[in-house]
Image (spheres, rainbow, N blue to C red):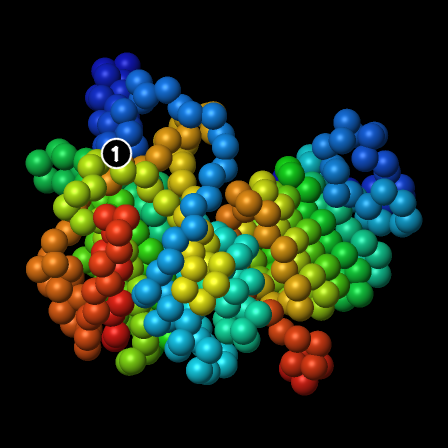
Amino acid sequence: MASGSRPQVRASMSSVSGNVMKFFRSSNQVASPAVPQKLARRSSGMGEVSRLLNSQEGLCVLDMGATSASNIRFFTSNGHKNYSEDLLCSSLDPALRIQDSAGNSVIDSKKFLDDNLVYPAAHFDVVLVWNLPDYMEESLVKPTIDRLWSVMKPGGFLLTFFHTRDAGPDSICYRYHVTGTDMLEMQEVKFAPPGRPSSEKQSPRLQRVFNNRHIENLFRDFASIKFFLARDAIREVLVVR
Amino acid sequence: MIYNRFIRGEQSASEDGGQSMDAPKTGEFAHIGKSVVIKGELSGSEDLYVDGNVEGKIELRNHSLTIGPNGNVKADISAKAVVVQGKLDGNVNASERVDLRKSAVMTGDVITQRIAIEEGAFLKGKVDVQREAGRAAAL
């Protein structure tokens, strides 16, 4: 019986691996040498967030990008509390994969939210989502935004970036370091797919492109939404809870 | 089965092939090796280097704790300074500073005066940097 179940297990593992791999670019691409390149970019959305941060002390800031020393320094030096939670990394956990009734491998969004974004209601004044919705599994995007609504204070700011329709699927996934009130440094994000050595790190793949209507629907429970169009095919969106 | 062993004394970085690059190089400190598993409450009045598994609570007050690259700690920590190179699951209250090295994987909240985070370190939790006056008032 044990030997009979092995092919099934193997098929199931390869299905999980296949589903996880779709978050990464094609593996036949030659990895470029690991040169940490950072690009500077001006951010109108971050400028608005900074105005709020400069006007008050002791605000709670949730940074949903990869752990960034410069972000922690930027927020804590102004007397704010910084919370770090890298949701893109957490969403790639193979343990989140389950099979639906049709046998397809899907992400268990309930387990994802049981393990992540566990905070008291109305806790955060600022949430930096960065480009997470563009790279995260689609089934997790709406539940994540709904959870953010509940953990944000009324009047709190949420900053997120979306690619415009010009971006191709191979557009580089960046993490963002705050270097000034309206200045960001962008650094390419790479993860090793589960079970692969760190030498095989790849950039996550752009999952979709949201248009304005999608974005408005995504944040329809929020009080207001403001768009800033940037030159680098990025639409900055500042949402007020 | 729980193994509990302390080795007390001096150790230079070269003795373990440079693996414990942040182990205190001189002076008295306690060293928990990578094969050691401890469950319970640890307290002391000397620096501590943990390269093994510790689950419980660590209280060093005026001394430093270093979690080595092989260290796996599930504990709330109170110390003067904390350096993390391995895995830490717990809250840290450090009166002076916290260093998260590039191999650090930490889940928990940090309260300290100064924090340094190397590129590649992973942190899931809150960072609350308190100035000296603020800390004194809090204590």
Could you tell me which chain the residue with mark 1 belongs to? A
In this view of the protein, which residue sits in the foreground, A44 or A239?
A44
Residue A139, given in percent of the width and then of the height, sits at 18, 49
> Label 1 belongs to which residue?
A170
Residue in view at x 12 percent, y 59 percent: A212
- Residue A227 position within the rendered picture, expressed as x and y whole percent measured from the top left: 21, 65
Residue at 17% across, 66% down? A219
Q: Can residue B42 be seen here?
A: no
Q: Is residue B27 left or right of residue A223?
A: right
| Residue A237 spot, x, y in % from top left | 24, 63
Q: Is residue A77 left or right of residue B9?
A: left
Residue in the picture at 79% in, 60% down: B63
* Foreground of the two, B30 or B119: B119
At label 1, counting other C-alpha atoms closer than 10 Å, the crowd grade (few under 14, some 14-19, many 20 or more) is: some
Q: Give amino acid for label 1.
A: Asp
Report the quarter where the N terminus of chain A lies: top left
